[in-house]
Each structure stands twice: as structure tokens, then as C-alpha cells.
Amino acid sequence: MALLAMSGCTPHAQPPATASGKGTPAAPPRVSPSVQDVVVQKPTYLIGITYPKANDLPAPLMQAMQGYAAQARARLEAAAKNLKPGDPGVPYDLSLEFRELPGNHALFRAIAAEGSLYSGGERGEALIRRFVWDVPGQRMLTAQALVPGAGGWQAISAFASDALVTQAKARFEADKLSPAEQQKALAELRPLVEKGTQPDAANFQDFEPQLDAQGRMIGLTFVFPPYQVAGYADGTQQVDVPASILLPWVAPDLRSRLVVQDKP
């Protein structure tokens, strides 16, 4: 397993503390300077972690990234602890890149974490995570804070499940599967989709703001790592959930951020 080439580089972090006085607005979060990338080359394992070069990211956002990276590194080092050069699968490997997603920085700062962790066996584990900083609210935005009620997750679950099955049908047709093969593949996929989109915030923890050309938020893109809603070979899956589905369910303080697009 090759070490990820570097050019410069979860539990979600807790919201920053507010100012102490009554009626006093929360102080802006401390801005964190860019952190150093991590490159480690040992006889039994390799580590490559790349962070964004922006030097104005909020400290809680940087801390969330560093926490996720530290957990992945700890898992790799624990797995490689008793290895010797020449053992099967050696060297183990952690490759992880954090990149800031383009968007409207007056509303959100969003980070995509993508990589892999190989600790033996046939293939590595995909590492997929999203971190979103709510700029006006001065907090890390979690799925639970985004949609606080069970009814919202029911609606999002139903939409995502249907969309994933539709996307799968398109993949099977593009692969030129016969009707019988498509039917069999869908029968195998549906239980995975149903389980991975159960109406629970934990199944939708990774999301990105979906913006139009004017920088308005027109929905959310939910991201699912391999195995959650599709097989490993199908890779990461994404579903765009439009504002029209989200609006009745998102937290009241976030509704003004959403814009429903006119139907063509």
C-alpha cells in the first residue's frame, strides 16, 4: 500500500463556550493557524495526513479534524504494534486528506475528510467524514442539531432510500446487466439501503451544504461510506436532498438559510 502523496494536508467537536454575561453574544471562536501535515515512515507502517492550508479556520473545526486523524492514527498504530518487517500485509498504511469544500463562507465552512486505513486483510477501510462549521451560529453543525425531530429523519430516510435505489438501477443499466441480473442485484442491495438509511441521525452524520451558483443553500448532500448503503466496489454514495424536503424539519434557526428552487 503506497503512502498518499502529500502536497500540504469522529466525534464532532463541541460548540464553543458563550460569553458569560446575560444577553452577551458568544465571542467569535479563536482562529486556528494551519497545522503541519503528518508523514511517518516506519518499517511496519506508513502514515500520511494532509490538512487544509487555510490559516483562518475556526479552532473547533481544526480540533474536529485533528481528533478524527488522531483516532485513525491510534487505530493504525495499535494494529501494527506487534508487527515485524516481512509479516503478511506489511507495511500497514494510513492515508488521510482533509480539504475545504468551496462554498459561501458567510454561512458555512465545510471540510471533507477522505482516505483509507489498511491494517491487514484483503482491502483497506475507507475513511469518509464531513465537518461543517455554522458561521452565524458559531458552532459545529451536527445532524442532530440540523434536524432535531424524528419526523424529519423519516422524511429524509424515505427520500434517500428511493434516490439510492434509483442511482443503483442507473449503475446496473450502465454496466449493461441483463434484466435478470439487475433484478438479482437490486434484491441484494435493497436490505443494505434499508439498513443504512434507517431514520436515525447517526446514519446521516456526514453531509455538505448544497449551493447554487449564487451561493444560496438549496439543499444538503448526504455522504455514505462504502458498505453503508452499497457494496465496497460501488464506492462512496451521495444523495442530494433538496430544500423542499428539508424545510419543514430543519431547526428553526436554520430555515432561513434554505432556498427552494423553482421547478423548471
Image (cartoon, grey):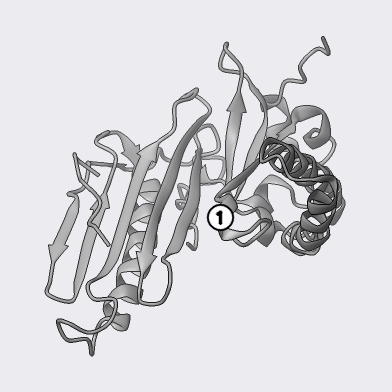
Residue at the bottom extreme?
A: 82
Asked whether residue 188 is in view, the answer is yes
Q: Position of residue 16 (x, y in %)?
A: 45, 51
Q: Quadrant location of residue 30?
A: top left
Q: At x 76% / y 29%, what residue is drawn?
A: 243
Residue 57 lies, with reference to residue 84, above or below; the image says above
Q: Is residue 13 visible?
A: no
Residue 40 x/y as whole percent? 15, 63
Dot 1 alpha-carbon crowd within 10 angstroms: few under 14, some 14 to 19, many 20 or more = few
Q: Helix, strand, or loop for circle 1?
A: helix
Q: Taking 117 as reference, is 229 left or right?
A: right
Question: Quarter of the image holding residue 213?
Answer: top right
* Residue of label 1: 233
Query: Looking at this view, is 79 or 133 the one in front?
Result: 79
Task: Judge left or right: residue 242 versus residue 206.
Answer: right
The amino acid type found where label 1 is placed reads Ala
Which residue appears at 61% of the width and 62% of the height? 227
Count of numbered circles on the image: 1
Residue 174 picture location, percent across and down:
68, 36
Q: Is residue 136 above or below residue 33?
A: above
Image quadrant occupied by the C terminus: top right
Decide which of 205, 249 is in the foreground and name it. Answer: 205
Q: Is residue 164 left or right of residue 25?
A: right
The vertical placement of 135 against 85, above or below, is above
* Quadrant of the image occupied by residue 98: top left
Query: Measuring 20% from the left and 65% from the top, which residue is drawn there?
Result: 46
Q: Quadrant of the N terminus?
A: bottom left
Q: Position of residue 194 (x, y in %)?
A: 80, 60
